[in-house]
Image: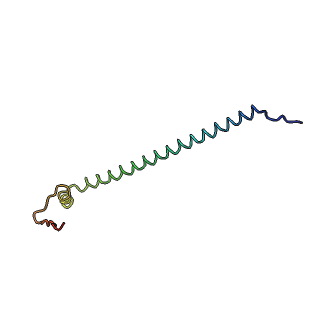
Amino acid sequence: MKTKRAGFATKIVILVLLVACALALLSLQTRLQQAQEELDAANQQVEDQIARNDALTDAIENRDDPDRIGDIARSQLDLLAPDEKVYVDIAD
């Protein structure tokens, strides 16, 4: 039994299909990489929000702590306790 060889047109069609498949795979790989980057960014946002929530939870739980209130007064409001003294370094 003899088999018929593929013609030139058949070879061109197969080549075009292979090129189309290769381009589709490259496009899919690019989209997959973009989706992975978006997922990484979303995961980072989740971690940042969890850290902010933990800080806020700590601030709420310790809102009446005198040491915490004093630290906030010193660092954010530049206030001093009545028994504290400030020394200014003028050597600069």
Q: Residue furthest front?
A: 92
Where is residue 24, by image quadrant?
A: top right
Percent from the top left, x then y, of residue 55?
A: 30, 54
* Residue 20 location, quadrant: top right
Q: Where is residue 18 drawn, in percent x and y?
A: 67, 38
Horizontal side of 55 relative to 41 (left or right) equals left
Tell me: 9 left or right of 84: right
Q: Nearer the viewer, residue 34 or 73?
A: 34
- Front residue of 35/66: it is 35
**Image position of 73 with respect to 21: above or below:** below
For image coordinates 84% across by 34% down, the residue present is 4
Count of numbered circles in the view: 0
Quarter holding the C terminus is: bottom left
60, above or below 5, in the image = below
Q: Residue furthest top?
A: 9
Q: Quadrant of the N terminus?
A: top right
Residue nearest the observer in this picture, 60 or 47: 47
* Image point (56%, 41%), residue name: 28
Q: Residue at x 22, y 55 (%)?
A: 63
State how the image is colored: rainbow
Residue furthest to the right:
1
Compared across the picture, whether 78 is left or right of 34 comes to left
Q: Measured along the vertical axis of the image, is residue 56 above or below residue 27?
A: below
Residue 4, compared with residue 47, is above or below; it is above
Residue 33: x percent and y percent?
A: 52, 45
Q: Residue at x 54, y 43 (%)?
A: 30
Residue at the far left: name it: 82
